[in-house]
Amino acid sequence: MTEEAAREQINRLRQLIRCHDHLYYVLDDPQLSDQEYDTLYHELEALEQSYPQFASADSPTRRIGERALKASGSTIAHNPSMYSLSNSYSEQELREFVDRIRRNLEPEPVEFVAEVKLDGASVSIAWRQGRLAWAATRGDGRTGDDITTAVRTIRSLPLQLDEPVDLLVRGEVVIGRRDFLAMNEIREENGEQPFANPRNAASGTLKLLDPLTVSQRKLRLLCYSENSGVSPTQWEGLQRLEQLKLPVNPVRLLCDDTEDIIAFCQKWEEGRDTLPWEIDGVVIKVNNSRQQERLGYTSKAPRWAFAYKFKAERTSTRLLAVSLQVGRTGVVTPVAELEPVSLMGSTISRATLHNFEEITRRDLRPGCLVFVEKGGDVIPKVTGPAEATTSYNPYLVPDSCPVCETSLVRAEEEVSWRCPNLNCPAQVRERIRHFVSRHAMDLEGLGEVLVYKLVAKNLVRDYLDIYSLKAEDLQGLEGLGELSTTNLLRAIEASRSRPAHRLLFALGIRYVGITVARTLIRALGSLPAVAAASEEELVAIQDIGPRTAASLHRFFNSSAGINILQRLELSGFNLEQSAELQTKVGFFNGLKVVLTGALQRLTRDQAVEAITGQGGTVTGSVSGKTDLVIVGADPGSKYQQAVQLGIPIMSEEEFVTKLAE
Ligand code: AMP
Ligand code: ZN
């Protein structure tokens, strides 16, 4: 074919295709079968490819409005495969990965590239002689779905490269957080189900057949690797893609020091919200392609790459309502009632909102779709709206207690609102629940429902009333038979002899936790002595601050407090410091101790009592200030941290021996 004949044929085909597009899209009157249409289309494509000098931006081959993909959908084989990444939430495992790589490649030096892990849909895209040829989803890693039509609508993606090269690129299709919100808003206006998160929105959009709708969805592509096998390093591959004007994941670092990798991970774990699109971790890759080859692949993932995943995972769900909880000190806490959603393996239907200010600050409105976030062992929290909030009514802070309707008050320096009514049924039952809880009087038989019933029936008005309960009050409640009633009454009686510090803790005085209670009893010898102490005497005790001192003083000088102390003194409670609490200055005196793993010979509470009984302190996490870590069976990460920081470690055996000394 001469050049002139080719030009004529190209023009004829373009006209013909445009004509059939018009028939198909506008007039809804197709005259060709899909196959006939495809034949024309491919002939044009082939000619345009062979005669790039006649390329034209307005060719139907370059248009968004090309004919929709057939619903059957074709597949494309991946070569090389699109692998997963081995991943972990643990910094320790990341360090181990880096060390392992270094050991395996010794004595060669190793460079790494750290890149943020984009949370979208992965795609593979090919250009032939500079023209976009196809795009596919990851699928099962070996073959993916043909999504060329959808990918072509991504505006940032050149359909034609400046150089006529063959290129294979992997990247992540994402939707910016703002675009996601706007998109959900439109969906809702159209009565459609909003997407749960930007990732679902991106992969859902890629599967759409209608390119026009796709083009309205503001997809973005961020490339993360050049896979044509020509780049000597990952880093240079990315630079090459940038040269070819492809959009490349910009948040990356070339480094050879482990600490720089860790710092990069920490920086972006904290700063993830400052990026316009969602990320869920950092990918660490060996930079050199030859070294990558040496390390090879497992059946699932490259041995030369590792994904460090951020601790929190998030999704979105509907905020059905804000319910209110009244605590034992009267603090009213808003609780988010959520449409149940699964997050990190558990179903979440409630989350605390901490206080009312937070609701306003985050602009959370009942009915609205919201983001819910959960870290490894962190309780779920609602972080913000996942759609435009304007169509929902703002949340109104209540002005009275939801239980007793007393007007709520707020102390100047506090964010929380409180019900000031000491006899508020909600407070009474929460105080009793605290009183009977495990570290306090430990009355297992008095469960939550039973306590609620007793309060509702006005059988108890405060926690000391449970000591006046009679068999006829209890029997029949919550399925309590004769025997269980007798047992419960006996257990209640027996609880009078609990150690004085647990009784003090059970009273539920603000800021007086079990540790503070122990400190107070140990310092002053008895509960009445604590009650009689002045604020000055209290703050003079080590570890007791002015806030706690003031709270104690207020309680024991209130009419309720005076009444409680009198009743305690009259009715056979154990008010004196017990022998076990008397400080025998022992081995653990002055040491900061951390416990990890399961102890076999004594409970954790007993271990804590024993250590503090000798003048030591027990803390929750290992730091540079820790003196000693006691290790039981199946220890957790605290053990590893201790090893790393070179902190002395003690087995349970040694611990028990030391205690006995
Ligand atoms: P996973 O699906 O958890 O096994 O992780 C592998 C996926 O992470 C890949 O298929 C990519 O879609 C995605 N990913 C996101 N950002 C990157 C990146 N910078 N480098 C490599 N993969 C990435
Ligand atoms: Zn109330």
Image (spheres, grey):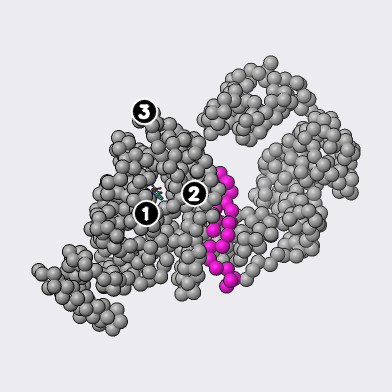
Task: Return the x and y of residue 234 as percentages of the image width and height.
Answer: 35, 44
Please state the total of marks drawn on the protein image.
3
In this orientation, does residue 184 appear?
Answer: no
Q: Which residue is mark 2?
A: 344
* Residue holding disc 1: 242
Q: Is residue 610 left or right of residue 106?
A: right
Q: Between tags 1 and 3, which lies in front?
A: 1
User: Looking at the image, is mark 1 or mark 2 earlier in the sequence?
Assistant: 1
Residue 106 is tagged as: 3
Q: Amino acid at mark 2?
A: Met
Tell me what residue is drawn at x 58 percent, y 48 percent. Answer: 379
- Pinpoint residue 55: horizontal percent, then vertical percent: 24, 68
Tags 1 and 3 in contact by the CB under 8 Å rule? no
Q: Left or right: 76 with respect to 123?
A: left
CA distance for labels 1 and 2? 36 Å
Element under disc 1: helix
Horizontal side of 425 relative to 194 (left or right) equals right
Q: Is residue 661 left or right of residue 650?
A: right
Q: Which residues are magenta?
A: 371-392
Query: Identity of the amino acid at label 1?
Result: Glu
Tags 3 and 2 touching, CB below 8 Å: no
Near-viewer residue (155 or 450): 155
Quarter holding the N terminus is bottom left
Front of the two marks 3 and 2: 3
Task: Look at the picture and state if 378 lies above or below 606.
Answer: below
Asked whether 388 falls inside the magenta stretch, the response is yes
The residue sitting at the top extreme is 661
Quarter in which the C terminus is drawn:
top right
